[in-house]
Image (cartoon, rainbow, N blue to C red):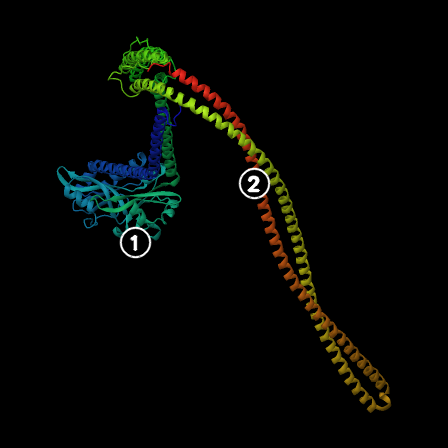
Amino acid sequence: MSTGRSSISSKITKYIISIGIMFILFSLLVSVVLMNGVKDDVYQSTKNLMTEQVLAGQRAKFDVGISNAVTIAQNSDIINALTYNNRNLAINSLGNISKNMKDGTPFKNVQIHIHTADVKSFLRDWTPDKFGDELASFRHTINKVKETKKPLSGIEAGKAGLVIRGLAPIFNGSEYIGSIEFIQGFNSVVKDLEKEDVFALVLMDEKFTAGSFKQEEKVGNYLLSQNYINQSFVSHTKNINFASLLNHGQYIDKKYFYSYENIKDFQGENVGIYLLATPIEVVNNSIANSSKIVYSLMILMTVMVILMIGTIIFIINNSVIKGLNTFKKDFQQFLEFVSFKINKFTPTTNIPDDEIGDLIENLNKTAVEFDKNLKDDMRVMGEIVLVTDKVEQGIYKCLIHSDTKNPMIHTLKSTINKMISQISQNMNDLRNTLNHYTHDDFRSRVTIDNRIKDEMREILTSVNILGDALAKNAKLNMQNGQTLENNANSMAASVANVAQKANEQAASLEETAAAVEEITSITRNNADNAQKMATLGNTVKSAVSKGQGLATQTASSMDQINKEVNAINEAIAVIDQIAFQTNILSLNAAVEAATAGEAGKGFAVVAGEVRNLASRSAEAAKEIKAIVETATTKANEGKSISDEMIKGYEDLNTHISQTIKIIEDVSNASKEQMLGIEQINDAVTMLDRVTQENASEANNVASIANETLAMAETLVSDAKSKKF
């Protein structure tokens, strides 16, 4: 049965999926963080790798320098050369050593320098002719070896830039007789790094510069301190922002990823930097590879989470949910069983071996016990139904014999048995008393126990009251029967007289009804005629309204004619004025023609004709004006007549409206009068019918009176037979 609630399976599934989604989202967040950190990690690992590579090359150089210096310092020829100041011996010995190194080792550009005990140059193998110069003022490594009498290796800044030096003291026995240094550059380190796609520049801080350098040897505030130079790489380094590089530890342009490592001399002081770089493609490839690993881990984690969620849901569905569904099915069946929707409970046999299985077993035991108790209850209830059915039929000699463990039903059974026993006793007493009453013996009474209350007590009391009433009524019936007998004789005589008078009244009402019917017919005709008069009045009113409208139109037309006549008068005035001016002009023309003599005769004739035409126009205008004035007078008279007609129509319309109203009042009064007469007619007709019915009823009453008399005689006889 669906109640709109979510199932436990769906809830658990939702929770697990929600947790999985949150875990996946967390994984995505971690992946995003890792992705953001991958680039920094790759940058840092790239810097660390390049730094380690260059420092490894530097350490190798240090080892080579110090080991060779110690070896050469123990060479007997070198010791003898210093002891006896034999430079030729030293030159020959160093020549052999240098030749062997260049032929058998990768160190092609090494230099060897021998110093005396007083820190002066004894022999430079690259410039044998230069010797005897004082070195103590600027060659601090030599001073350190003289002071400690121990070999050392390190970097020293000098006139030639940064140099890797391996130094060892030279002893003749226990006497310090000088020192030797094995001088190396950074070329092999730079070349080895390039084989690993790492480009390096050895840069010395310009503050340690002892001499002048060419501009092309400068990179930022540093000077190149290496012989091997990759010009393409150097040209790219010219655009580096060294401030950003030194501040952030790295710098990136379109082609290279740069970092640096400080170069410290043998005393630990910063004397320059290794400018390190690798192609940006290499770094980007590393980032891409690391990103792929992160993506793969993210996908793997997502797949594992999904598989884990699926596995958990599968396990829950096949263990917990399956058991819950079994319990739900059994519990639903149990509810239907206890609510009597089904008659039989079938226990589940496939019970899981867990807590849910315990619940199902307990439910099955409860259902079996409930079924047994229910059957006992049903047996008792069935017997109760049978017993109550018999009680309903009036059988009180039956009791309930079955029993049950249900205390309520057991109490019900005992109560019903006790009730039936008591009712049976009361019914027997009641039956005996009523049997006496049926035999016209009203002296018997029911014995009422004090335990009997309410309705049963009322019933038994009512039976006793009934006995009293029957006895009293029997006595009263005898008295009434005697009285009724006497009255019946009197009523029979009176009814006969009433019947005679009713017949006479019915005859009189028949005549009255005929007269009223005739008056009703006359009144109905009068009402119809009044209605016709009202209709004719409305027709006349409509005609008068139409005539009034026509008169109004006539008056309007007269006003229009008057306006047109005024316009004609104005036109005639214009024509008269034109004729007058034409006459003046013709007179002037005649005067001019007379002045002109013979030449103006023709013109004088024309002027005369024009004057005649002007005179005729003036006369015609006067005649038209007279006619128009006459028309104006007639139009004004017509307008006055139209106004009188309109006023007359208005008065006539008013009088007709009043007449129609009077006719309508008469018509309404006639209708009301007709309705009143019809009501009178109906009343008279009904009265006639009632009178005739009364006459008939009077005859019936007379018959009834006779029957009543007979009944009274019977009643008196019956009352005399009762015992009371």
Residue 576 location (% of width, % of height)? 75, 79
Screen quadrant of the C terminus:
top left
The quadrant of the rendering that contains the N terminus is top left
Q: In which quadrant of the rendered view does residue 20 lie? A: top left
- The spot of residue 44 in percent (x, y) is 31, 39
Position above or below: 565 against 116: below
Residue type pointed to by label 2: Ile
Along the horizontal axis of the image, is 230 left or right of 207?
right
For this view, does 709 lie left or right of residue 220? right
Q: What secondary structure is marked by label 2? A: helix
Residue matched to label 1: 212
| Residue 347 appears in the picture as rendered | no
Q: Which corner quadrant of the image does residue 202 belong to?
A: top left
**Residue most extreme to the left:** 174
Mark 1, residues whose alpha carbon is within 10 Å: few (<14), some, or many (≥20)?
A: few
Where's residue 86, x and y in %? 20, 42
Q: Is residue 594 left or right of residue 278?
A: right
In front: 451, or 443? 443
The residue to which callout 2 is attached is 680
Numbered disc 1: secondary structure: loop
Q: Height in image: 601 above or below 339?
A: below
Which quadrant of the structure image shows residue 400? Answer: top left
Label 1 – label 2 distance at C-alpha: 154 Å
Camera-side residue of 93 and 348? 348
Other residues around mark 2 within 10 Å, as few (<14) / some (14–19) / many (≥20): some
Residue 664 showing in the rendered view: yes
Q: Amino acid at mark 1?
A: Ser
Viewer-proximal residue, 298 or 369? 369
Q: Position of residue 30 (x, y in %)?
A: 33, 35
Camera-side residue: 533 or 9?
Answer: 533
- Which comes sooner in the sequence, label 1 or label 2? 1
